[in-house]
Image (tube, helix red, strand yellow):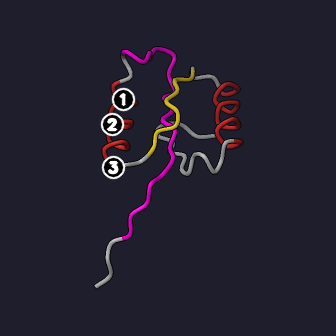
């Protein structure tokens, strides 16, 4: 039997919302807590307005930081 391999991912939590703040972003906080509890690194937690240009700019910035952030996860919407 093979031992289960584990890894540590460097992550960014991105909430896309015109109304959320860090005080009201319970989903973002939850995702950050789950990732941290699983020993992953949350390098950034960002709230960005629901504006296509700003979203693309943020993801371009995050992509430039690669391999700092290993995974991108879109919960809503499409690019």
Image coordinates of residue 41 in percent, x first then y, are 45, 44
- Which residue is found at the position 37% from the left and 37% from the top? 31
Tell whether 56 sits left or right of 7: right
- Label number found at residue 29: 1
Marks 2 and 1 close (CB-CB < 8 Å): yes
Marks 1 and 3 close (CB-CB < 8 Å): no
Range of the magenta residues? 5-23
Give me the C-alpha separation between circle 2 and circle 1.
Answer: 6 Å
Q: What predominant SS class does the magenta segment belong to?
A: loop
Residue at the spot of label 2: 33
| Residue 37, placed above or below residue 32 | below
Secondary structure, mark 3, is: loop
Q: Within 10 Å of the Cα at label 2, are there few (<14), some (14-19), or many (20+) other Cα atoms? A: some
Residue at the spot of label 3: 38
| Residue 63, placed above or below residue 3 | above
Viewer-nearest residue: 49 or 71: 71
Secondary structure, mark 1, is: helix
- Which residue is found at the position 54% from the left and 46% from the top? 72
Q: Residue 35 occupies which quadrant of the picture?
A: top left
Label whose residue precedes the other's in the sequence (3 or 2):
2
Image coordinates of residue 64 in percent, x first then y, are 71, 42
Q: Within 10 Å of the Cα at label 3, are there few (<14), some (14-19), or many (20+) other Cα atoms? A: few
Tag nearer the camera, 1 or 3: 3
Q: Specify the quadrant that holds the N terminus.
A: bottom left
Image coordinates of residue 26 in percent, x first then y, are 33, 25
């Amino acid at each position: 039997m093979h031992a289960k391999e584990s890894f540590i991912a460097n992550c960014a939590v991105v909430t896309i919302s015109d109304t959320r703040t860090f005080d009201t972003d319970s989903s973002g906080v939850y995702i950050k807590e789950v990732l941290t509890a699983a020993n992953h690194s949350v390098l950034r937690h960002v709230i960005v307005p629901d504006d296509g240009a700003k979203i693309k700019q943020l993801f371009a910035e995050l992509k430039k930081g690669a391999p700092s952030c290993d995974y991108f996860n879109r919960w809503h919407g499409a690019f």
